[in-house]
Image: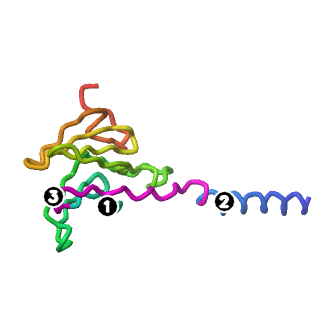
Amino acid sequence: MKQKLISVLAVLAFVALASPVIAKRSAPKPVASVTQDGIEYSAPLEREGFVVATWVKTKREIWSRQVYVIKHEYQRGLETDVQTCFITRLEGRAGKLRVWNERGAEFEVDLQSLAVAVVKGPAVIDYTGREPPGQ
């Protein structure tokens, strides 16, 4: 009886210690920046869903633009790091910046007006678990 109790406690301790490690997602890979006309366009990991323009010579930020919206209302029991969506790729195209994210969505930022056009996928990623009104 005592041995069964010790075995059960050992299994429970293993599961409790292993669960946080299993639930964590690995850090996203850094996204290669794009440089055009002395300006570097990047997608910093700490600014999820944003593109930042920086002067190459001075390293001063010119502007930042939110490309897509992430609605967070962290769900209980679900790790916060799986309720994220990072930019995965940037590509410069004749006055435009093409942006892809982990969900497969694709956007195009006009580098003059900073207008964002959705090419594919949703512009809003909703982790709240709520249905929009009227649905």
Is the C-beta separation of discs 2 and 3 under 8 Å?
no
- Vertical placement of 4 versus 88: above or below? below
Residue denoted by label 2: 18
Was residue 70 drawn as part of the magenta stretch in this picture?
A: no
In the image, what residue occupies the spot 19% across and 60% down? 53
In the picture provided, is 47 more to the left or to the right than 2?
left
Q: CA distance from mark 2 to mark 1?
A: 30 Å
Discs 3/1, front: 3
Is 15 in front, or is 36?
36
Is 38 in front, or is 3?
38
Q: CA distance from mark 2 to mark 3?
A: 49 Å
Q: Which residues are magenta?
A: 21-39
In the image, what residue occupies the spot 29% across and 60% down? 47
Residue denoted by label 3: 37
Please name the amino acid that badge 2 sits on.
Ala
Quadrant holding the C terminus: top left
